[in-house]
Image (cartoon, rainbow, N blue to C red):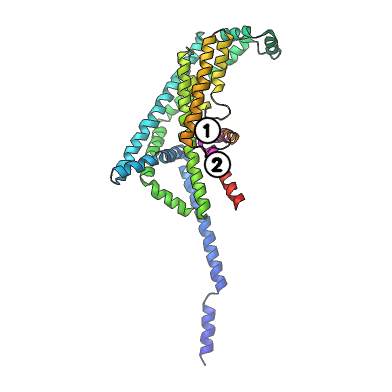
Amino acid sequence: MAWPGLVIAVSVSQPSFHSLMNNHTVHQSFFHILLVVVTLALAWVLLPFFGAIFWGAILAILFQPMQRYLAARFGKRRNLAALTTLGAAIIIVIIPLAIVAVTLVQEIALVYARIKSGELNFELYFQHVLHALPVSAQQLLGRYGLDDIAGLQRKLMEGAAQISQFAAVQALSIGQNTFQFVVSFGVMLYLVFFLLRDGGEIGRRIRCAIPLDPEPKLHLIVKFTTVVRATVKGNIAVAAVQGLLGGLIFCILGIGGSLLWGVLMAFLSLLPAVGAAIVWVPAALYFFMTGQMLKGLILVVFCVVVIGLVDNVLRPILVGKDTKMPDWVVLISTLGGMALFGINGFVIGPLVAALFMASWDLFSQD
């Protein structure tokens, strides 16, 4: 007679299936909220070192093939391979960039001093160009007030002063924040070492943690690494070569501030459909209008043939033919990225655009 009571007691004491499912859902929801909160908290903590972490990850991605090659040659001694690869990254990337940055600041200050002292007389240059133009062109410029040589000279002086002051402020800021700069630089090198050494394991954990099916997951990861390689290794290498060649031809033709113009050409080379022509075309026009036909012809032929071949030959080798996004997408995303994130934006902008296109492509296929 005790069996029915026992059954009733057991049925009452054990939780129902629905209550178990509700508890499981609550636990999952709480865990997901906790995961988002701690992730955002860690991002907030690491935000002061965003630049160091970002470029550390970029350098690690770029030099990971060298790390794997050296690890195989050194008998799987990953620490030695990572340390050697880090030394190579410092020699190949960091030291040349530091030298160029310091020299560029000095060059900007020197050009501004020459303009202020009258050694570089832009008024005389404008007069030569203006007098070489046809009468109709001179009248058209006069209609819009562009024949005011003194006013243009004054505007150029103001622009040069602002550029010089900006460079001086940036150099002074770095000097005043030397401790923060050194700490960020040390964090970047420290991170590069461990990402090189443990990059394979970290990559596997990230791939396992991404909640996607294997095929779209692989597609997005390949797109991510491809865009990083294309943007950094390909575009920067091409821009550096074009800037070097542009500065060299400017120096040979006797154009002052050749380093400054070369760096500017390298920077503009990152922007498709714009490029270094913004710098060398006005210089070539000046040569032609002032009667220096040989110099103008040399400049045009060199920039069109040599610098153009660098883009057409070197870029496919470093980037690959099947990884290029439309030029207008690269241009807009690069400009937007730099407007939001500064110098980091020329990588972040195209990367976000590429992942956007890849995600929507997967969605449309699905």
What kind of secondary structure does the magenta stretch mostly adopt? helix
Please say whether residue 349 is one of the residues in the magenta stretch.
yes
Please say whether residue 287 is one of the residues in the magenta stretch.
no
Q: What residue span does the magenta drawing correspond to?
A: 336-351
Amino acid type at mark 2? Ala
Q: Classify residue 266 as left or right of residue 366.
A: left
Where residue 312 appears, x then y in whole percent?
A: 51, 29
Mark 2 vs 1, N-terminal side: 1
Q: Can residue 40 be seen by looking at this rendering?
A: no
Please give the label number shown on residue 363. none
Q: Which residue is mark 2?
A: 354
- Please determine whether, in this image, residue 315 is positioned above or below residue 356: above
Q: Quadrant of residue 244?
A: top left
- Residue nearest the viewer, comparing 56 with 28: 56
- Please determine whether, in this image, residue 236 is positioned above or below residue 81: above
Where residue 150 appears, x then y in whole percent?
A: 61, 9
Q: Classify residue 86 as left or right of residue 308.
A: left
Q: Quadrant of residue 331?
A: top right
Amino acid type at mark 1? Gly
Circle 2 — which element?
A: helix
- Tell me what residue is drawn at x 46 percent, y 21 percent: 245
User: Cβ–Cβ below 8 Å for labels 2 and 1?
Assistant: no
Measured in 3D between alpha carbons, the distance from the residue under mark 2 to the one under mark 1, in whole angstroms, is: 19 Å
Please give the label number shown on residue 342. 1
